[in-house]
Image (tube, grey):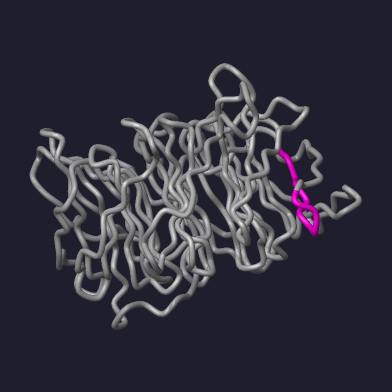
Amino acid sequence: MNTNTTNKNRIVIHGLPYVYVSYENNRGNGAIAVIDCTRNQIIERITSFFNPTAMCTDPSEERLYVTDNRLKRVMIFRTDDFLFLAGIAVGTSSSPDPVAVFVEPGGKKLYVANYGEHSVSIIDTVTLRIIKNVNMFTLQPGILGRPFAFTCNEKSSYVYVACKRDNAKDYLVALSLEDDTAYPLDFEEDITFGDTRNPLTVHPDGHTLVSLGEVGMLNYFGDRPVGLYDSISLLDNTVSGIYLDNRMLFCTTREDKSYLKVFKNLAIDSNRNITYENFIEVPSYKAQDIIRTSRTQKYIGVTVKPTDLPTGGVQVIDVASLNYEFIALDVVGDMTFPSDSSVYVGQQNSVRPIDLASMVPQPAIQIGGYDITVKSIISGYSNQSS
């Protein structure tokens, strides 16, 4: 489940904006390819995996964290020399099925969503030991949720977890950054998240959590641990989104819609008053999939699956003007912005760089032979899980 999101303008190791590409061959063995974007060449292959499922870096981009479904571990590497640091078993069962990994903005704690066993593993990034395994079933007996996505920002007091529920409405859990206490947030409305995209993003003020889905929710978090919430119809039928530092919120919409929803300063306060400065619909395409932003948040990128067009592609939007370009591609997978000058798109067994000055695709970087499949790609830290 790939929902990479808000890349910040961090210091990149040795000035090189690396792109990390997870892939797997038809025998079920996987690895991570490391691309140096200054040369568009693979400079390293990290092969300590069977089935890599999710990746992230820490805020300083000094470590790479990768979950492995078959090893049932999160694997940790340095990003300067790709030295293996540790492999930490996650969950408590034989089938944790880790699908998302996330380091909170302070860099002190690592979170792994164990979809198969309905739990979240919290890990100390200094000692590299499990702090706590939070069982979603014990939070609310009878409510068996499957965690699959995280978000948090520098002003948040909580890490927020999106949970899918079998044959019932989905829900949220807030995990306290201070003491790891879990607070389930079960709404009166029937909320339904998308199956694979991260539906959570946080206002820059840290108080407003935006929950996207068939019903759009705003949640206020202040001094009290349980959030006050209300719905807003303008967020209905959304799937995933990104809240930028300039207080613009970009939201993708469900597959049959051909527009993006864009808000300015959408928020909810402690009295449950919902406010926003502006709302517009930006023309897009049906079958919107992944949404990302560049490191300085100059651009927003949205991948489009080839369902309504002869081919799919990437819609690149200039945040300041909201003008956009559509770059057609035959195969469209995951996507990441290593800088403001390029966006990289995963394809079947390659990664395609796109030059943002000319909006022209560059020669594909072959990741392996015809027997491999590119899974996910990231570059830099994000305040949402991917």
The single residue placed furthest to the bottom in the displayed view is: 14
Percent coordinates x, y for residue 123 in the rendering: 43, 56
In the image: residue 299, left or right of residue 44: right
Q: Nearer the viewer, residue 92 or 193?
A: 92
- Locate residue 146, reporting x and y percent: 50, 32
Task: Report the front residue among 86 and 339.
Answer: 86
Q: Quadrant of residue 18?
A: bottom left
Q: Is residue 278 visible?
A: yes
On whether residue 223 falls in the magenta region, the answer is: yes
Residue at 42% in and 50% down = 101
Residue 103 is left or right of residue 372, and the answer is right
* Residue 340, image quadrant: bottom left
What residue lies at 8% left-to-right and 45% top-to-bottom?
369
Q: Quadrant of the N terminus?
A: top left
Residue 352 in view (yes/no)? no
**Overall secondary structure of the magenta stretch?**
loop
**Image x and y of residue 164, in percent:** 54, 30
Classify residue 95 as left or right of residue 362.
right
Instruction: Give the magenta range.
Output: 216-225
Q: Determine the residue positioned at 51% across, 72% down.
A: 296
